[in-house]
């Protein structure tokens, strides 16, 4: 299996950073740069850039600049996806974003990591594992999600959290490291004010 095939699998892996496909990373950086400098009124041009960048790009994918990713082809949106300003996705493994996902400003989804051992880290050893956000997930401002994590459907992650382990469906979780605080309940339904 070559490095590109390995990157597209749902398995965690460990390789030399020097084996990563730099041409594909340059393409992603160029497309992100173009997207970030596009006119907000150029909706179709922006959508075309995202379709070229992402592996799967649902038509209801909306991103506020600045947005950066490592490769793009490993990012898959599966329904309405709202990504706010200054989001970074290090997609050295697949990142699946379910329908009705909201990523607040400053969110970082990082499949990529480095060796814990200092000598291996100095040699450029890279680790990677996929990230999955199931349907109806909301990540608060400045949340970091580490590789190998799945966040269950309908869960909310509080601002500033660092998610290092799976989070079940239908809960509110927060903290560093992130932990479940309580289930989402009917009491969480916002009362709308008539205008």
Image: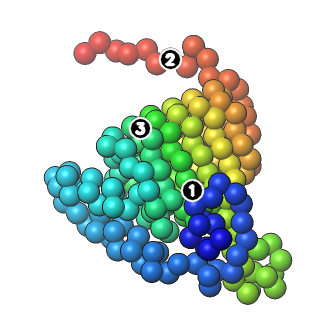
| Residue under pointer 3 | 79
Q: Residue furthest left?
A: 41
**Residue at mark 1 to residue at mark 3: CA–CA distance:** 16 Å
Residue 111 in sight: yes
Q: Residues within 10 Å of mark 3 (few under 14, many from 20)?
A: some
Q: Nearer the viewer, mark 3 or mark 2?
A: 3
Cα separation, mark 2 vs mark 1, equals 32 Å
Earlier sequence position, callout 2 versus callout 1: 1
| Residue at image coords 46%, 62% | 73
Q: Give the side of residue 136 with respect to residue 118, left or right.
A: left
Left or right of 108 on screen, residue 176: right
Q: Residue at x 65, y 71 (%)?
A: 1
Q: Position of residue 77 (x, y in %)?
A: 44, 46
Q: How many marks?
A: 3
Q: Earlier in the sequence, mark 3 or mark 2?
A: 3
Mark 2, residue position: 189
**Image point 41% across, 70% down: which residue?**
28
Q: Which residue is mark 1?
A: 94
Quarter of the image holding residue 23?
A: bottom left
Q: Residue at x 44, y 34 (%)?
A: 100
Give residue 83's position: percent from left, percent from top.
41, 48
Q: Nearer the viewer, residue 12 or 70?
A: 12
Disc nearer the start of the sequence (1/3): 3
């Amino acid at each position: 299996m070559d490095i590109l095939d390995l990157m597209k699998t749902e398995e965690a892996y460990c390789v030399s950073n020097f084996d990563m496909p730099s041409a594909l990373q340059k393409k992603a950086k160029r497309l992100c740069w173009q997207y970030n400098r596009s006119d907000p009124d150029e909706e179709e041009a922006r959508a075309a850039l995202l379709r070229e960048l992402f592996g799967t790009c649902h038509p209801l994918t909306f991103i506020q600049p600045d947005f950066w990713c490592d490769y793009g082809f490993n990012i898959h949106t599966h329904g309405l996806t709202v990504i706010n300003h200054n989001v970074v996705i290090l997609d050295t493994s697949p990142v699946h974003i379910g329908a009705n996902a909201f990523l607040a400003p400053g969110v970082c989804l990082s499949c990529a990591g480095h060796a814990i051992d200092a000598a291996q880290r100095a040699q450029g050893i890279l680790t990677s594992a996929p990230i999955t956000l199931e349907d109806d997930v909301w990540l608060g401002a400045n949340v970091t999600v580490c590789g190998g994590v799945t966040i269950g459907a309908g869960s909310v992650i509080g601002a500033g959290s660092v998610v290092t382990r799976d989070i079940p469906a239908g809960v509110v979780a927060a903290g560093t490291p992130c932990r479940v605080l309580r289930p989402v309940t009917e009491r969480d339904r916002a009362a709308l004010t008539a205008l």
